[in-house]
Image (spheres, rainbow, N blue to C red):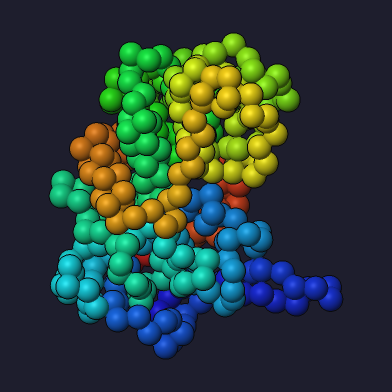
Amino acid sequence: MIQALVVHEVPSDGKHKRVAKFEEVEESFLSDEGTVVDVAYSGINYKDALALTGRPGVVKKTPLVAGIDLVGTISSSGDDRFSPGDWIVLNGAGQSETRHGGLASRAHIDPALAISLPERMTPARAAAIGTAGYTAALSVARLASEGVTPEDGPVLVTGATGGVGSIAILLLARAGYDVAALTGRADELGDYLHRLGATSLVARSDLSEAGKPLQSARWAGVVDAVGGTVLANAVAQTVPGGIVTACGLAGSPDLPTTVLPFILRGVTLAGIDSVWASLEAREEAWAILARDLDGDVLDSLTEEVPLEGAIAASGRLLAGETHGRIRVNVSGG
């Protein structure tokens, strides 16, 4: 039997709602993919929190094991790259959407987008990084590939106290960028953000109301995990030729802006797809994380919960009661 967090669709007042349950299932409940993983850790990202609290938009079919991340060891391999006992990391790739995910003691996976655990990185730290940190690394890599350098000016990070934002600040600061952190919790978490490497704080209220499509140019680059009006204002404040990476929608999926920043300033809006990123992009992002992310700092911003505690932790995340990363110890080791 396998312990798992399974999302079900159940009747409620003549309708249907999604409910996540901690339960034991037969291994036959999983898919018949040829690569089997004994899962040690998973994590709680924003999408996980939505799935585990019954929100729509993530889980596309039920019943389904939740968890968009997994870190574990190969039990049996259907891929020449991996052998039994190898540690692997898999982020996204349809997990917790159309495929059973990593919040279970065992997973049957398509290994095409799995990578080997990077050298010099422990499984626990890889799980703490998870999709949030991997997405942050994809965003930082995109800024660099588009030619944004520390000399070009400050980089704005929105949703700064969240998983993506926290790790983006760490990576950008390590690379020498002047980082501005957007937060609505400056009094409470300002010291935390400065410890991560932010050189200045920007009040969330400064970007939360509708503004002009072109505003004073401030940012050479932006890492945005919020969307909505915050992203629109960030675009409007980006310098000519600047790059804005969009990787989340914690605030809204909308983008209430105009074409003016793009045709008058040449701003680039670069989408970051962490779910189906290529194997090469994944390996580059994880190489950045293994090289530049301070493990001790990562530990200090990581909370660990057991598998059966993940649903309650998801509620706290959506309520804004957490910051940093939440790792799920699936194996209990």
Which residue: 41% across, 62% down? 93
Farthest residue, direction top: 216
- Frontmost residue, 7 versus 232: 232
Q: In the rendering, at what x and y percent does residue 210 appear?
A: 73, 25
Query: Is residue 113 rendered to the left or right of residue 310?
Result: left
Which quadrant of the rendered structure holds the N terminus? bottom left
Q: In the rendering, at what x and y percent does residue 35 appear?
A: 28, 77
Query: Is residue 264 rendered to the left or right of residue 171?
Result: right
Which quadrant of the rendered structure holds the C terminus? bottom left
Which residue: 17% across, 73% down? 80
On the question of residue 189 being in view, the answer is no
Farthest residue, direction right: 14
- Frontmost residue, 318 versus 248: 248
Q: In the rendering, at what x and y percent does residue 41 appear?
A: 34, 60
- Frontmost residue, 52 versus 246: 246
Which residue: 32% across, 62% down? 113
On the question of residue 79 being in view, the answer is yes
**In the image, residue 196 above or below residue 255:** above
Using the rendered view, name the quadrant where residue 183 is placed.
top right
**In the image, residue 91 above or below residue 19:** above
Query: Is residue 327 rendered to the left or right of residue 214?
Result: left
Which residue: 49% across, 17% down? 240
**In the image, residue 302 above or below residue 294:** below
Using the rendered view, name the quadrant where residue 111 is placed.
bottom left
Q: In the rendering, at what x and y percent does residue 212 appear?
A: 70, 19
Q: Please give the count of numbered marks on the rendered protein.
A: 0
